[in-house]
Amino acid sequence: MPMLSTVIASRIRDLLPELERVYTDIHAHPELGYQEVQACGWLSDFLARQGFKVEKGVGGVDTAFRGTIETGDGPTVAILCEYDALPGIGHACGHNIIATSGAGAGAALAAVRAQLPKGRIQVIGTPAEEGGGGKIKLIKAGVFQDVDCAMMIHGFDRTILHQDLLGIVRGTFEFSGKASHASADPWEGVNALDAVIQTYNAVSMMRQQVRPDCRIHGIITNGGAAANIIPESASAIFYTRAPRIDTMWDLFKRVTAAAEGAAKATGCTLKVTQHESVYEPMKSSRVMLDLFAANMRGAGLTEGAPIPDRLGSSDIGNVSQVIPAIQPMVAIAPTGMAIHTREFADAAVKPLARAGMVAAAKTMALTTFDLLAEPARVKAAKDEFARSR
Ligand SMILES: [Zn+2]
Ligand SMILES: [Zn+2]
């Protein structure tokens, strides 16, 4: 009997024209978060053709899906897909490749169904990563309740086994003052723009006293109506990011305190609205990462130079806080190319992206197989997760 890795590799090779069509179609029809109707449809249809039982709209989210293959009592391993695009610049985060590598891994496992150890493989489609927090909704709806561990990959300019993700809290700060003629009766006014500027400056000063792995960034969304009116309302949005959940909330509290101080100083009232989707930092799973690393070499993926200061956020962080989860970065674009750029969007359908997709699909298929074959590894991953709480 041929080696499992050989069978998986040849199945992915056979399916390549179909997989290519899926990622090219998703790329050519970029859909924003929670509107990924076509992508969800193409991926679900593909998985159903491979023998998965597919449910659409899981967790009460229309464009989410779950494909399942069950071979008996055993662990449940999930492979996650993202497929939302960015406004204006399409698939500049390469989610078309994330989706297709996840579906490809599932298809390869379906092809070795007879050899699969007992358990469950789920390919879960998770919408709206770019700000909408689709995975948070799925967690709340219980979609991950019976999942033992989860994995996905993200396209990047190099391959990196584990990249830290910062937790992020977003908030809108609205100040209300009193309008008045800015020249004839300025003393009658209460200046809401002053409160926004005061907040912005206080946050800028605060940055010297925050750790280098934290981030605070914001914009002014309303600065008044006309220069001859003392602005009666003004507002700003700030994002605060930190590598730990407690420091993330601490930082958000400090920004809020700065805004409260500005309100007091200017005589304005303040309304703070914390945005619903809070992305949590990424926990790492050494057990799963070691398995992925061992399989990745055979699939032709080599780790690139670490880049510890290029820090983003994602709702896979929230998943990693409830079950062991990993998100290795896989090279799909030339080294040095930034993500969320038009160049990266162009790269996401080029040969380098195809090669990354194929290697990622193989690696995830083998890693999933290994976890099912050795439930002790799943237990080790869960023990490690419990210890790191
Ligand atoms: Zn992105
Ligand atoms: Zn992304």
Image: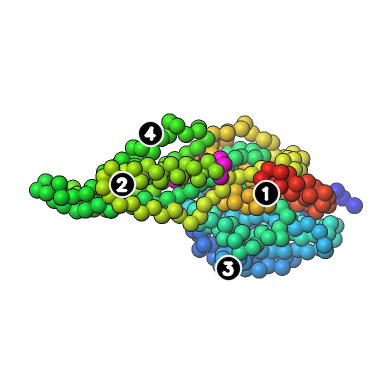
C-alpha distance separating marks 3 and 1:
23 Å
Image location (x, y in percent) of residue 269: 30, 52
Q: Secondary structure at mark 2?
A: helix
In the rendered structure, the answer to whether residue 222 lies left or right of residue 358 reads left
In the rendered structure, the answer to whether residue 191 lies left or right of residue 68 reads left
Labelled disc at residue 60:
3
Marks 4 and 1: in contact by CB < 8 Å?
no
Residue under label 2, please give it.
263
C-alpha distance separating marks 1 and 2:
42 Å
Image location (x, y in percent) of residue 270: 33, 51
Is 241 contained in the magenta span?
A: yes
Q: Amino acid at mark 4?
A: Met
Residue under label 4, please give it.
205
Question: Which of the pair 230/61 is nearer the observer?
Answer: 230
Question: Which of the pair 78/187 is nearer the observer?
Answer: 187
- Within 10 Å of disc 2 (Cα), the crowding (few <14, some 14-19, many 20+) is many
